[in-house]
Amino acid sequence: MIRRLLLLSLCLGLAACDSSDTAPLPLNLYECDAGEAAVRHLITLLPDINPGVPKSYSIVLGEINRDGMTPASEAFTKRFADLKLKFIDAQFLKDIEPDHTIVESDTRLAAFVLQLRSLQPTSATTWDAEVGWSYKKEFARIRLRLEVRDGKTSVVKAEKVEGS
């Protein structure tokens, strides 16, 4: 009887430690090659809103909620320097009333908020991601499938979930 109880408790313990759990990655692990590929793909999808008006861009990780947003690190943001876009840290963004437009604190110009909402490895070479962008009242959310081929991570499938 004791043997069966011990076996049962071991089985329950192993089930609780199941590695197939789909718990999200810690946000600092979003700043990897797959995260970079997801954000780069998102940038290619941005519409040309207000042509001729200078734009700034800010990368945030995880959920955006009433408590705020988690800015990407400076090191991660520097990976996008080749794009010659003006990136600013999300901590320098400001919410302007009455329509809650997100603007750069210094210039008070609207900024594109680029969100790497989720990133989850599905195998040794594939990832699922959800990204989004917002600019004034415009926004979109997209699900991505990324794959590593020959050492390069790229998007192999994109599906718009909602938005503009």
Image: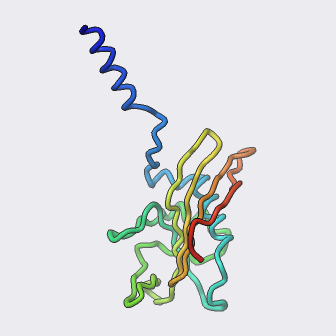
Horizontal side of residue 89 vs 158, given as left or right: left
Please give the name of the residue rendered at 45% of the width and 60% of the height, measured from the top-left corner. 62
Residue under the image location 75 percent in, 44 percent down: 150
Residue, far left: 2
Residue 138 appears at what percent x and percent y? 55, 81
Q: Position of residue 39 (x, y in %)?
A: 60, 63
Q: Residue at x 66, y 75 (%)?
A: 84
The quarter of the picture where residue 23 lies is top left
Would you say 13 lies left or right of 102 here? Answer: left
Q: Position of residue 50 (x, y in %)?
A: 62, 90
Q: Is residue 40 above or below residue 11?
A: below
Comparing 4 with 23, the one in front is 4
Find residue 19 and report its horizontal and vertical position in percent: 46, 34
Q: Is residue 21 shown above or below 47?
A: above
The colour scheme used here is rainbow
Position of the N terminus, as image quadrant, is top left
The number of numbered discs placed on residues in the rendered structure image is 0
- For the residue pair 88 and 60, the one nearer the viewer reads as 60
Quick one: which residue is furthest to the right in this view? Answer: 150
**Residue 164 sits in which quadrant?**
bottom right
Q: Residue placed at 63% from the left, 85% from the top?
A: 49
Q: Residue furthest front?
A: 1
